[in-house]
Amino acid sequence: MLDLSNRILRTDIAGMPLEWVTYQEAVRLYYLEQVVYACGRLMYRVRGGYSAATGRRSVVELNSIIATEGSIQASLKGRSGYTPPLDNKALFRRDDYLCLYCGDRFRNSLLSRDHVTPISRNGEDTWNNVVTACKRCNNFKAGRKPEEAGMQLLAVPFTPTHAEYVYLKGRRILADQMEFLRAHFPRTSPLRSRQPVDDMDA
């Protein structure tokens, strides 16, 4: 049976990754004639109605990656000053579902957002000041800095680029989509070695 839950990677005309879209949204982009080109593997073949004039049935072939005519807002996401919105699911995926204090891997429901410099100590709720922590380690650290609690960070927090953020927001990423995204990651990105994985929801 055909799995229609896989998302299609939408890019701008220059190939900058923008977002994930459903097959219905992709069909709509084709209908609006906003798709400039497609690449990657064929994912879906969507059949529509029959033409009264020709008697032929319409067919839209959807590849795993489609490039569309962009907007000013979309192009801004590729600029160096752009900061993606911070949310826990993307944060946990950035840190590979690891508690960056004890080093163990947990499901989403057992993880929390820890502020390296606590908010109560003028720390900010930003990518560079937050890490994934299991609830036990977060409770133990409490309102202290890691060194005050005798804890050591296992990795340095970082702000993802928009291409990295698109990866972090993806689910069930296909191999060709991952290869495409990886080509847009910074050379030093810790995400370059990642393999496509499903979310660790629970």
Image: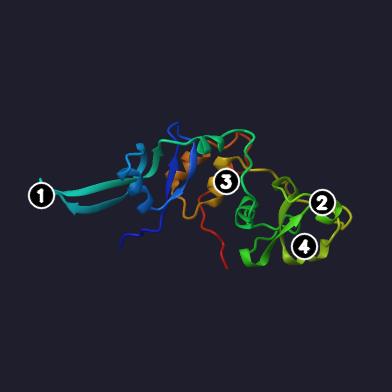
Kind of residue sitting beneath label 1 = Gly
- Is 174 positioned to the left or the right of 58 in the image? right
Q: At 81% from the left edge and 52% from the top edge, which residue is drawn?
A: 152
The percent coordinates of residue 43 (x first, y second) are 34, 49
Kind of residue sitting beneath label 4 = Asn
Determine the CA span between mark 3 and mark 4.
24 Å
From the image, tell me which residue sits under label 3. 165
Mark with earlier residue (4, 1): 1
Label 1: state its secondary structure. Answer: loop
Mark with earlier residue (3, 1): 1
Label 2: state its secondary structure. Answer: loop
Label 4: state its secondary structure. Answer: helix
* Nearer-the-camera pick, 63 or 70: 70
Kind of residue sitting beneath label 3 = Tyr
Q: Which of marks 3 and 4 is in front?
A: 3
Determine the CA span between mark 4 and mark 1.
65 Å
From the image, tell me which residue sits under label 4. 138
Determine the CA span between mark 3 and mark 1.
45 Å
Label 3: state its secondary structure. Answer: helix
Q: Which of marks 1 and 2 is in front?
A: 1
Determine the CA span between mark 4 and mark 2.
12 Å
